[in-house]
Amino acid sequence: MKIATYNINSINGRLPVLLRWLKEESPDIVCLQELKAPQERFPLKAVKDAGYQAIWHGEKSWNGVAVLSRFEIVEVTRELPGEKEDGHSRYLEVIINQVLICCLYLPNGNPYPGPKFEYKMAWIKRLMKRAKILLKMEVPVVIIGDFNIIPTDRDVYKPEKFSENALFRIEVRKAFKQLIGQGWTDSIRLLFKEDGVYTFWDYFRNAYGRNAGLRLDHILLSPKIAPRLLEGGIDRHVRGWEKSSDHAPVWIMLGDKNEYGRN
């Protein structure tokens, strides 16, 4: 089963890019972020014509997350527990093929310091609390999406340039490390141990051409599903397509549970 995450950066504006990538790479499950479309403007017909079911949580102008799947999708929740007044569309929790998928678009947090950074840290704490509960359930869980977190110096082309950036603040990196410490597997880092493994390149200063990138998009696996990890990758070439998102799709391949007999 091939599971992918892709910050599409406007699903309607970049629909041709999305459909081309779906046709060429044929992922089974796709978690999308930054739809930048209200609920009623999600391009459901085009997604269905491409062979996918969809559940989405839209928001006017900004944010928005969606899960596309070749299999049946059962929605669990579209709110990250912990703050009833949070109106941002940043979280979807669904069940597909007996796997719990948590699709997220974590807040950027800039500028630092300020209320946006405080909101980001509060959101991370809510996520950590939810993640801990999910681990206790002892079921296969995938937490996947645009975390807006650069975990370590190895995940950014020039660490010194980002010391005061909310993506790379020490508080944020510490929180990510604590999240992983609960027992989650950072699948892409496990598979690719070298430096220069990026998922995002800014539109400015020829960042993509210079490979001046950041690793922001992550796929975390619970202990019940981590043994099924076979391979993964970053479809870096998609970032070079015309009118593409500033993120590249990131994916993993999971073996069948019966093959491993662990979950």
Image (cartoon, grey):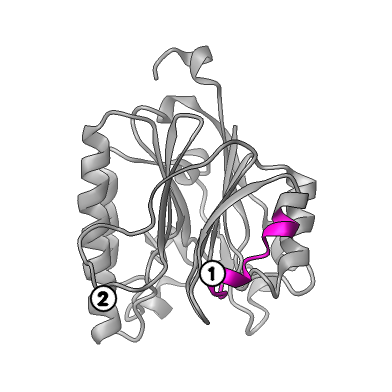
The answer to whether 141 appears left or right of 199 in the picture is: left
Query: Is the residue 67 above or below the residue 122 in the image?
Result: above
Going from the N terminus, do you reach mark 1 or mark 2 first? 1
Task: Name the spot of residue 97 as percent of width and height, x first.
Answer: 51, 30
Element class at badge 1: helix
Q: Are marks 1 and 2 in contact (CB under 8 Å)?
A: no
Q: Is residue 113 visible?
A: no
The residue mark sitting in front, 1 or 2, is 1
The circle drawn on residue 119 is: 2
Q: Is residue 39 magenta?
A: yes
Say what amino acid the circle numbered 1 marks: Gln
Residue pictured at 39% horizontal, 20% vertical: 263
Q: Residue furthest front?
A: 40
Dot 2 alpha-carbon crowd within 10 angstroms: few under 14, some 14 to 19, many 20 or more: some
Element class at badge 2: helix
Measure the alpha-carbon separation of dots 1 and 2: 24 Å
Query: Is the residue 201 above or below the residue 141 in the image?
Result: below
Q: Which residues are magenta?
A: 36-47
Task: Name the spot of residue 173 as percent of width and height, x first.
Answer: 29, 62
Q: Which residue is mark 1?
A: 39
The answer to whether 236 appears left or right of 115 in the picture is: right
The answer to whether 175 appears left or right of 50 in the picture is: left
